[in-house]
Image: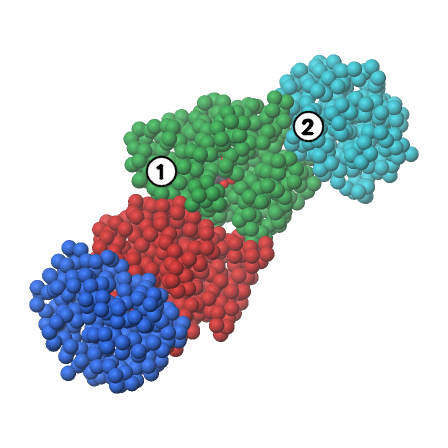
Chain colours: A blue, B cyan, C green, D red
Amino acid sequence: MNRINEKLNKDGKLLSIYFSAGYPNLSDTASIIQDLEKNGVDMIEIGLPFSDPLADGPTIQASSTAALKNGMTSDVLFNQLKDIRKTVSIPLIIMGYFNPMLQYGVEAFCAKCKEVGVDGLIIPDLPVDVYDEQYKSVFKKHGLINVFLITPQTSKERIDYIDSISEGFIYMVSSASVTGSGDGFGDAQTAYFKRISDLNLKHPQIVGFGIKDEHSFKQATTHAKGAIIGSAFIKHLTSHGTEKISDFVENIKA
Amino acid sequence: MNRINEKLNKDGKLLSIYFSAGYPNLSDTASIIQDLEKNGVDMIEIGLPFSDPLADGPTIQASSTAALKNGMTSDVLFNQLKDIRKTVSIPLIIMGYFNPMLQYGVEAFCAKCKEVGVDGLIIPDLPVDVYDEQYKSVFKKHGLINVFLITPQTSKERIDYIDSISEGFIYMVSSASVTGSGDGFGDAQTAYFKRISDLNLKHPQIVGFGIKDEHSFKQATTHAKGAIIGSAFIKHLTSHGTEKISDFVENIKA
Amino acid sequence: MTYNINEKGYYGEFGGAYIPEMLYPNVEELRLNYLKIMAEPSFKEAFDQLLKDYVGRPSPLYFAKRMSAKYKTKIYLKREDLNHTGAHKINNTVGQILMAQRLGKTRIIAETGAGQHGVATATVCALMGMECIVYMGEIDIARQAPNVARMKMLGAKVVPALSGSRTLKDATNEAIRDWINNPVDTHYIIGSVVGPHPYPDMVARFQAIVSEEIQWQLKEKEGTEKPTYVVACVGGGSNAAGAFYHYLEDTDVKLIAVEAAGKGVDSGESAATSILGKEGIIHGSKTLLMQTKDGQITEPYSISAGLDYPGVGPMHAHLYKTGRAEFMAITDDDAMLAGLELSKTEGIIPAIETAHSLAIFKYKTFKPEDIVVINLSGRGDKDLQNYIEYFDL
Amino acid sequence: MTYNINEKGYYGEFGGAYIPEMLYPNVEELRLNYLKIMAEPSFKEAFDQLLKDYVGRPSPLYFAKRMSAKYKTKIYLKREDLNHTGAHKINNTVGQILMAQRLGKTRIIAETGAGQHGVATATVCALMGMECIVYMGEIDIARQAPNVARMKMLGAKVVPALSGSRTLKDATNEAIRDWINNPVDTHYIIGSVVGPHPYPDMVARFQAIVSEEIQWQLKEKEGTEKPTYVVACVGGGSNAAGAFYHYLEDTDVKLIAVEAAGKGVDSGESAATSILGKEGIIHGSKTLLMQTKDGQITEPYSISAGLDYPGVGPMHAHLYKTGRAEFMAITDDDAMLAGLELSKTEGIIPAIETAHSLAIFKYKTFKPEDIVVINLSGRGDKDLQNYIEYFDL
Ligand SMILES: Cc1ncc(COP(=O)(O)O)c(C=O)c1O
Ligand SMILES: Cc1ncc(COP(=O)(O)O)c(C=O)c1O
């Protein structure tokens, strides 16, 4: 069974953390992953940086750009992860844009993911139908779970479709907005979380975009299985470096 | 008999000098006229300065502009000339553009000319036919001679017409060019002087434009009754002031 | 009473050819030939063809919906701004270059103020492979750098006028001087309905395409050839002459000529020639012009270089004197605001010259059923720097 | 084989909609409605009316006599430079603003590089009274000041893109981000045949008016609807798409697409996307793009801001891959000289983008009986500063 499904099957709310691989320093990737697990994080999205991350906000874009400058590439990342499963057991997901994967070769990319122990992928600009038609079999072959997004604007019909081809969780975008904006959740958003929850989908939902502290984590996970924090964690790395990761995680889980 | 005709009836070649009234200093007008007569000049064109002297070259335009700055106006000029006939007996001609005369009132302007003892006018931008139809009677009434221009491009027919309504001399423009350009006369120009001379017109011709020294004066007057010097004299005034007028005239008549 | 020119070259008491004898052969050659040449089928064909394929005519007659709603009347814009090179000026230069060719001329001179006419002249000279010299005041050269560059790109020589106030009036003097010095091979392309006869008439006839098109375009849109009003700004007067031309004798159609009041008609810094001018002679024509009591031509002022001329064409002097056209004077400030307004309500940035005609709505109320045709004489690209600075964009 | 789009939104293997889920509702709404709306008689009527009265269409098909003589073939110029705002870009923005209205959108966003598309978008927003936000790279804002001023005159808000290389690519990213953040009321007017399906097809259809007109105009002039060649420069590819559109399936008509070689195709400073690019995804579309081995999009270089884009529309990727169109790459230097040449021989100063297509005569010889139609995509006024500096005018 895929580590993602295992984790989703457990009780309790899941805290998932996103960061850009190769940031703040090129070689920080593995140790950040290890620290996050050590501090009780349930799942990690490892950002594969891209030159033109059009669904990301300024914080993640800046960390992406810095990581690229540091020398991050797909090959470097796979190399950094090659021994990760010796020390880390929580689910690891690579989140990145489709073009670098395409250049790597989707098949080769998936094979490498499997090889190093990555469990799934989130590719914002790979549409569900293209995945469905062209890439599903490759992902399956390598035991990878592809995670799809839904937003407050996603129709019931489409949610059902996404649910039907999902295998892990559904990434529920808190509001139709790029990452890192917003300030806690309002009535509209919590109503949306509840609405989706009430659909009783086959796959659990994890909320992303806009979670940054204990309060917003609680709000997000009232109706969902878990939440992903990205920009807030990157800001923490930018301000405090990699030393105080425990502070950040404790603040959320407090 | 008008002083211009008297002068034209005499033997010998005539030297006529043009300068801008009020240049170099506003009050130089009368004394320049007196000096010119004293030094043997036969006739004088007093330039009434105009803001936009489009048939004049840069030298005359600059002296016009300076004269206007000095405060020259039609009224000022008439005032400066009011006692001129007490000391000066050679023909005096006002040369100027039509607009200032029009504003003064053509009738009033002519009357003033007569009053101060001006003998004729040269108005480059008053066309022959307009003069003929509208202003001839006024000029006659005040005993003024209006002088017309011909150029190398003027047709035989038109020369005859101009000759027919002229009463003094014909101002023969040496070449179809604004004043002050050229450098001595070439074959084309002397041929033109001869061609006109051979027409045996009723009225004598005086050459203007391009005469600046003894040599060009001789060339111009080989076939013509006289010649007018403008730019060269103004340049002399600019360089030497009003003190050395005798030098300039002697150089021509040498 | 006729409002057009008579056989002697006068509009009422205005017009004529007050030129030095040195220009007589050139001007006379033109006078004797221009109507004949313009009537030749081959000339007409070449002119029409170039206007269509090169200039981009017909220029649209555009119903300005949002402006109309705002001012509660029917406003149409005659889009001369869409012509090649961006203004009505090219209608005239296309006509005159063909005229020059038929007169056997090989060298073209022109004067320019804002540079629009200079560009239009340089353009047709490039098109025909003719030598082109453009006179431009030294000050205008400095403040209209993009148009100077355009002329040079087009292969024209731009000669600075260094005398007088070093603006349009002086550039015109220099061009006339050049013509006096080059009486045989050179044609002088005057840029407006000014200068000695037959220039005002010839230029008006070349610009008359504007009202010719308005007639059939309005017929298509409103079922009538006759607008209630035709409005145009007046520098020398060529775009107004073109827009008025076919309506001159039809007094059902009211004409409004808009002059530049600069900082105010009575401020001493203005170019409202008809209102402030007196009869006199400028650049070979008897007309209204701004001058001192003593008959010296004064330097006008307007924020728009194209209206910054101390005279006005003799046709307009006549229209003013007879009352056939209503003359309005619009200040710099009103014009700039009207330019911004058109930009924001219709998506069209007008030349500042043109913006003067758009400002009349501030002062004049029209009836809902009135059809007001405004000649949009040029686009505002050349004026961007001015707009930027004025509005601090 | 078809060279046009298929029902799935692909040109051969290129195209599609590689978009984040957040954009799905917007893009899907457009995809489901664009053909239906474009087919509505009231839409057609409004579009045609605006193209005629506002944009100034048809744009002339001008026989360039002196250029033809020089290059010993028949050269026709399709005068998109005469359109309102000075380029072909407005054909598309007029279409899209009408589309946005019919989709009930009230807020318009756009990206722009050189500013031409930004101006064209700001223009139609002013015309319709819609809010307009234009994203533009911080560097482009600095080097295209006049177009920034035009947008502001037109009431648009110009927002600097501060990320990445701060040019067109990044402005596009910012626009997409804005759209993600404003999924309900906002329509994104993309400026070329790029972006996710249905944009490439929709923009191509709006630009198709260009070849539609070439067909009947050429029929009038040469008795045939078919030129031997159609030539157009390619940035994103919209003016080429418009000029090629009605000839895509007619292989009698040869197509030439001209890309910017910058300082040389192999200099490392180039924007010759088709030649240098590899298959990939950019701005929602699978196409050819310039990228590192690792799949990072690289910054292209061209002296012309409008060709300075690392991707190319999927239609062109397909035309390249299939060999339907010949692709030529023209350097900065050749383009600048060709721009000067057109200015001096025909009196038309082209946009530097367009000048690239005029430079092909240096490298390709045509037969005397060939009919070569060049899409004159825009005028050079926006590029004067560049020309001035380059030629030291
Ligand atoms: C756009 C525009 N409108 C009007 C004028 C004024 O000239 P006219 O009165 O001859 O039309 C100019 C002159 O440069 C101009 O460029
Ligand atoms: C005049 C002109 N031509 C061509 C282009 C390139 O765009 P496209 O390839 O979409 O026609 C631009 C873009 O700004 C342009 O302004």
Do the residues bearing badges 1 and 2 touch, measured as CB atoms within 8 Å? no
Residue lying at 56% horizontally and 23% vertically, measured from the top left: C278
Q: Residue placed farthest to the right in the image?
A: B254
Position of A4 with respect to C243 (left or right) is: left
Q: Is residue C386 above or below residue D204?
A: above
Quarter holding residue A234: bottom left
The quarter of the displayed image where residue C136 is located = top right
The answer to whether one can see residue A131 in this image is no
**Crowding near pointer 1: few (<14 within 10 Å), some, many (20+)?**
many
Q: Please name whichever residue, C105 or A244, is drawn nearer the observer in this view of the structure.
A: A244
Which dot marks residue A159? none
Look at label 2 and name its amino acid. Answer: Leu
Rendering coords of residue C81 (x, y %): 43, 44
Residue D105 shows in this picture: yes
For label 2, the residue is: B68
Q: Is residue C385 left or right of residue A181?
A: right
B115, above or below A153, in the image: above
Residue C390 spot, x, y in % from top left: 46, 40
Provide the residue designation for mark 1: C76
The verdict on label 2 being within 8 Å of ligand 1 is: no
